[in-house]
Image (cartoon, rainbow, N blue to C red):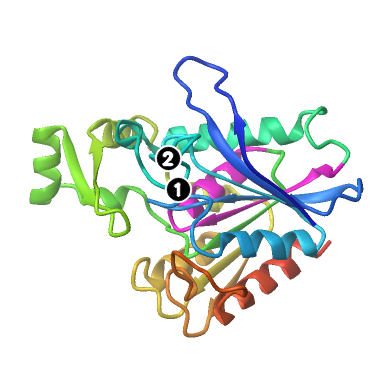
Amino acid sequence: MQSIKNQVLAPLQPAQKPIVYDAYFKNDRKAKAVVIFCHGYKGFKDWGPWHLVATAFAKAGFFFLKFNFSHNGGTVHQPIDFPDLESFAQNNYSLELDDVDRVLDFICADSNYSNQIDASKISLIGHSRGGGIALIKAQEDPRVNKVVTWAGVSDYKARFQENTPGFLEFKKQGVYYVQNARTKQQLPHYWQFYTNFIENQKRLTIKRAVQELQKPGLIIHGENDTTVGMQEAQNLHQWGNTSELFIAPEANHVFNAKHPYPQASMPKALTDVVTKTILFLSAL
């Protein structure tokens, strides 16, 4: 099994930022189905046991790519910490969809891993906020064949909590801050985060994407998830035409993992999630 870490997709346009990615695969020059993993809010590709997840998929015969969204706050030289708070403040859902598009363009290019992948078999996995991104992109992009959400959200608009005192203060000040429990930083969000959503609301409505999705989908959620409630998984499943729902017993939002994660094996809950996902993506 080979892992190629901290590779960089350079910006193609002045407004873009680099995307840092890792690729895990068996270096056997055989065509492999591709899995692209999208992290969640305040997430990053090197969080906790994501490397163990990537290894498990590679051992199962997939080409697994995990990446940092370009505006997640990390940089090429510091992909784990969040030194670039200005980029974090400028992030929005549209930029994240553009990032997935850039990754798809890269992986489908003939010169990039073409002797290792089957570009006709591409699946997206999205964790938490990344679940919504994965669903929207799967619906709109014909290159994506299957989609899986892990603890995925079902509604971006609801998270703005419009008309609450906090939202009105956000509008007045043009910025609001959320503490990162890991780094203790105050992470800024600019008002553009909301206005970009409103300007692109139809595209960014997860319910619409799921209702229009005509591809196999798997919705996985932890039984004890207190970050994204179980109802959101049930919503996604009920809206979908072709989805399967799997509730991970006694699992929290990160399937009982943590960061950092020095252990050599995944928690049982995450192992079960990975096994279930591999079976789903392996099915014809």
Q: Secondary structure at mark 1?
A: loop
Residue at 69% x, 73% y: name it: 275
Q: Which residue is mark 2?
A: 74
Q: What crowding class fits label 2: few (fewer than 14 Cα within 10 Å), some (14-19), or many (20 or more)?
A: many
Residue at 51% x, 43% y: name it: 68
Considering only order in the chain, which callout, 2 or 1, is on the residue closer to the N terminus?
Answer: 2
Judge from the rendering whether residue 158 lies leftward or rightward of residue 62; answer left or right.
left
Q: What crowding class fits label 1: few (fewer than 14 Cα within 10 Å), some (14-19), or many (20 or more)?
A: some
Front residue (pair 193, 43): 43
Judge from the rendering whether residue 17 lies leftward or rightward of residue 61; answer left or right.
left
Q: Amino acid at mark 1?
A: Ile
Residue at 52% x, 53% y: name it: 46
Residue 281 position, x and y percent, is: 74, 61
Quadrant of the image containing the N terminus: bottom right
Residue 34 position, x and y percent, is: 75, 49
Q: Amino acid at mark 2?
A: Gly
Region of the chain picked out in magenta, as a range: 116-141
Residue 204 position, x and y percent, is: 43, 41
Residue 188 position, x and y percent, is: 24, 40
Residue at 83% x, 54% y: name it: 26
Judge from the rendering whether residue 230 lies leftward or rightward of residue 103; answer left or right.
left
Judge from the rendering whether residue 225 lies leftward or rightward of residue 106; answer left or right.
left
Name which quarter of the figure residue 126 lies in: bottom right
Residue 67 visible in the displayed image: yes
Q: Which residue is mark 1?
A: 80
Q: Is residue 67 magenta?
A: no
Circles 1 and 2 in contact, beta carbons < 8 Å: yes
Q: Secondary structure at mark 2?
A: loop
Front residue (pair 88, 220): 88
